Amino acid sequence: MLRLNNGDAFPLLTLDTVGDGALSVTHHLARFYGVVLLYRGSWCPYCNAQLAAFARAREKLDDLGLKVVALSVDNRADATALVEKHGLNFPVGYGVNAETVAASTGAYVNDSPRYLQSTGFVLDPNGKVITAVYSSGAIGRLVAEDVIGFVGYVKSKA
């Protein structure tokens, strides 16, 4: 199965997003460091905690020039409720096809019900992967403070 490695270009993904309409992930993140979070669904407590932590870290992310995009197979109503519940301040895509996203990113897919397992990518301003975290189950995901420290380090060495 395909896995994205450091240096690989992030694939072209277009999402329907809560409040923002259609969005091209790579276009939205172009010229910025980017974080792409594939989350299991609004029902997942670990995903809720991760997304809320990224929303709370907005000021630090902005200071580093980091933009975040999240996506899942959730329907529009569930994704909208999640955005409202946590005050998510970044684009949240909904209704993605698990197989299509998995084929282009290498994310693990849960069989029944069908959803993407938690997967996270940090991208450089050219859209290249600089780290990828793949989880095959409920735990194991990017943490906002780790991403902030990592990108701060990368930028200090540039």
Image (cartoon, rainbow, N blue to C red):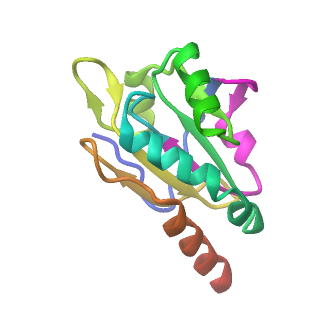
- In the displayed structure, would residue 86 be above or below residue 3? above
Give how far across and how far down residue 116 sits, in percent: 36, 31
Which quadrant is the C terminus positioned in?
A: bottom right
Query: Relative to residue 146, is residue 93 drawn left or right?
Result: right
The residue closer to the viewer here, 26 or 83, is: 83
Whether residue 74 is visible: yes
- In the displayed structure, would residue 43 be above or below residue 6? above
Give how far across and how far down residue 51 sits, in percent: 53, 45
Query: Relative to residue 7, is residue 31 drawn left or right?
Result: right
Residue most extreme to the bottom: 157
Does the segment drawn in magenta span residue 141?
A: no
The residue closer to the viewer here, 67 or 131, is: 67
Which quadrant is the N terminus positioned in?
A: top left
Does the segment drawn in magenta span residue 36?
A: yes
Residue under the point 66% across and 39% down = 87
The residue closer to the viewer here, 117 or 26, is: 117
Whether residue 9 is visible: no
Residue stretch rendered in magenta on the structure: 17-37
Residue under the point 56% across and 75% down = 149
The residue closer to the viewer here, 55 or 122, is: 55
